[in-house]
Image (spheres, rainbow, N blue to C red):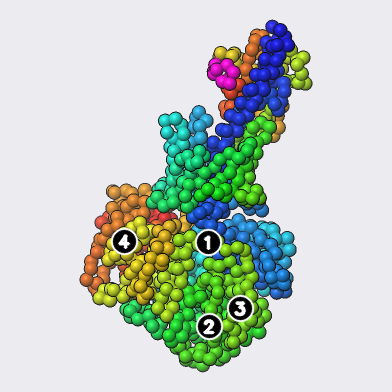
Amino acid sequence: MKSRYRALVAGYCAFAACFGTIRAQQNATQIVPPSLVFELLALNGDLETAARPKYRSPAAMAASPDGKYLYVAEQTAKRIAVIDLTAKSVAREILMPNEPTGIAVTADGSKLYVTCSSQQWPAGILCEISASAGTVLRRIAVGHSARSPVINPAGTKVYVCNWLESTISEVDISAGKEAAKIPVVREPYEAVITRDGNYVVVGNSLPEEKATDTTTIAAKITFINTATRLPAKTISLPAGSHSLFGMCLSNDGNYAFATHLIGRTSIPATTLAGGWVHSNNLAIIDITNQKLANDVELDDATQGAANPWGVACTGDDKFLCIAHAGSNQMLIIDQVRLITKANAGVNLSHDFTSLAGIKKAVFIQGRAPRDIVTIGTTAYVAPYFSDAIYRYAVSLSTSLPIDSLVLGPAKPFTAEREGEFRFSDASLCYQKWQSCASCHPFTRPDALNWILNQAVNNAPKNVKSLLYCFQTPPENWLGRRANAFISVEYGVRLELMTEPSPDITVPLDTFLMKLKPVPSPFLVKGQFSDAAKRGKTLFYSTAKTDCAWCHKGSLFTDCDRHAAGVADPDEVNTVFDTPSLIEGWRTAPYNHLGSMTTLEEITRVPGHSTNVYRLTQAEMNDLLEYLKSL
Amino acid sequence: MPRILACAAYFLALPGVLLAPFTAAARIDRIDLYDKSDNRLMFVTFAYDASGNNTGRSVFMADSTFVRSTTFQNDVSGNRVRETSFNFNGDTAGYTTFTILNAKPAISVFDQFGLDQLGGPVSAGASGTNAFDVSQKGAVINRVQYQFDAGNNLTRINVLDAGGNLQYYAAVNAVNRAIVPMRLYSAKQPSLSMIGSRYCRIQLTVDKPSIVRLDAYAPAGRKVATLLSVTCGPGSSDVVADCAAARLPDGIYLFRASVDGVPAISHRQAIVGVRGGAR
């Protein structure tokens, strides 16, 4: 009897043990099912899906000082590929905590400093990496959408462009933390440091003025005094300049070169030829005198050199190489003769002949080259939508690459990816003068006013963000297009002067309708500050404000047109589209005219609201904090 | 007479295996996701109602930047049918729907406008013990493995590529549930000759001062006695309950331990499995 009982107990225990184990483990897998883990990593761009293959997107490069290695930031793959240039193969891949946006190598080659940030997680991280071990040694918090790290000659500080925060972070390497944050003009995208380390020269990608200041509005170069941590000098590029995406310093340290576009906004955008809508230019900065030596048009008379991006000098300072993402080419320029011409005292910013005989355009095999580095007289070009780096021997007779360095197998393009490429592809445009990205850098506004092809009888209008354009019809300030499908077609037809076909418009539509907002730099760890919380209460308080009357719903627009109190004597129309407030922190200048540079101005303008003007300044500050956080 | 008490003592006497029926996995409060190079990417916190049911979760990037919060919608049978995510402003950021695809549970993820985010449903089916294959469009694209400790606590989830190479992993953070490993066993060595044992011993580790309580229940579910209610400091603790001192009569008892009111070692599953849910 006793043994039978023991057997029964043992049987029960065995059953219950299994049952309990299974139940407990099932419970855990129900709370964290495999699909949840997958979803989390897929939405963060870590695991690839049918919708989002893990593209490499080589966006930035740097060479080791001995010229033996090339470091490639594979932005969307979140890793650094280390290419052994002797073996011509990828020697190592270093995983990064977020998308790498820029690379700097210390003078002794022992360490890399890599900026990381992404649309999903824009909080910047500066990663210190051991070049020999390929491991991340330190992660240093910097600013929003960090990119373009530069190391001072002493090797004691790293400066980082906090692109959408419009600041520069100074990082103390020994302390391993941000030592200062320096405000600059607007959206600093690239920077270089002078050979003596006294100045960080910052390229601000967008102008900050009212768009109605058509004779002065321009992107700017800021000289930051590294001792005082203050802007020492600000240089304006030619009027209409924007999209400054590339900078380099000559090896002798005497000049900085900055690529940018010039929007010729003072005339209707009816004639692409001759660069009368956009010209693609290079600013030449005299470092010693902190002035613009000249600005040179890179286009030919009958062919645009659209969307210049990365720029690099050969080691002997004989040639300048520029990657053109839109026209898919590399431009090689005789740097010595360029400097001579630049200093001749003639404005070259709209002169097709200035580079005649001293430049060579080389077609790039990959798609949309954005960065370029040189080792000696060899140039390495990184097409963003490709899986290889192309190597060229630089001279004015260069036409073909020496070879290509394959990063890995190519991934087939989804419609969204094809659309992203097509958005910056100037081959869609008559004579390759511009791409969609020329007026809509990264699909957001260029901050300028334009008179477009079918609106020549209307007053100039400020460029709108394309974020949520598919979800907030009708399109443009006057609601002229019923929806974004039509708007995309007309954009290709009228602004690129190409007849749109479905193989172009469908990918563009797919790409644009999937755009997501970038979290605001005014959020605190992704959430509202206390002031923004108070502002949110005010925003929805009908007793205090009437904001939500027009800016309603989750997209903050009623998709209707209203008179918002903005005087426009040149415009026959009196009502204009209600813009979404999402990403309002980055879409200045405001209103259909672009005549106001701050959200406070447009909020306070008489006629915009019936009661907002009654707010106290403290309440207004809270309301603005909320608006800037969206 | 002593034999009866020995039943309970027997359960308590064989840690690892026979204790399993008494060991309900502790509550998962947070998971941290890493890549294979140990870069921390993000973490997820889980919310529960008073009954211990998981009611939502929030996603944060590694630096604590809030990404989204998610609430659940179940059908009348308790099956998950939809999860809705909200952004920092409380607006819908997207949603996930749950279906069965080729006899496997599958998800589809959409943004707030209903635009598919994954390029079609993604299913996950068991491929082995605590192992699952994640498939899309008929092909395995990832494999997910779960690891548990001896107490059935989920400790780690590995995400492998289709070839079985580790790509990412999730570390299950148990700090908030207060119990890291927990074992309940007799003061005597496990043995069938333990009949008449009067002691129960609890070893546990907590991260903050916690009240540890041990209750005895009759098989019918009535609580008979509280054998122990002590405060344990941070770190490892070792406490012993004396059944005789608690004047517990001889009989069949089932024990339930809790830490700060959270069931840590429960008799529920054992009773439900054999006795038909007496409690």
Q: Which residue is mark 4?
A: A483
Proximity of marks 1 and 3: CB atoms separated by less than 8 Å: no
Q: Quadrant of the N terminus of chain A?
A: top right
Mark 4: which secondary structure?
loop
User: What residue do we see at 72% from left, 70% from top?
Assistant: A87
Identify the image quadrant of residue A285: bottom right
Badge 3 density bin: few <14, some 14–19, many ≥20, Cα 10 Å:
some
In the image, residue A49 lies at what x, y percent? 52, 53
**Disc ID at residue A401:** 3
Q: Which residue is mark 1?
A: A412
Looking at the rendered structure, the kind of residue marked 2 is: Ala
In the image, residue A457 lies at what x, y percent? 25, 76
The span shown in magenta is B271-279
Q: Which residue is mark 2?
A: A361
Q: Is residue A484 above or below residue A398?
A: above
Of residues A26 and A444, the one nearer the viewer is A26
User: What residue do we see at 54% from left, 36% from top?
Assistant: A30
In the image, residue A573 lies at what x, y percent? 23, 68
Same subunit: marks 1 and 4? yes
Badge 1 density bin: few <14, some 14–19, many ≥20, Cα 10 Å:
few
Which of marks 3 and 2 precedes in the sequence? 2
Marks 1/4: CA–CA distance? 29 Å
Marks 2/4: CA–CA distance? 39 Å
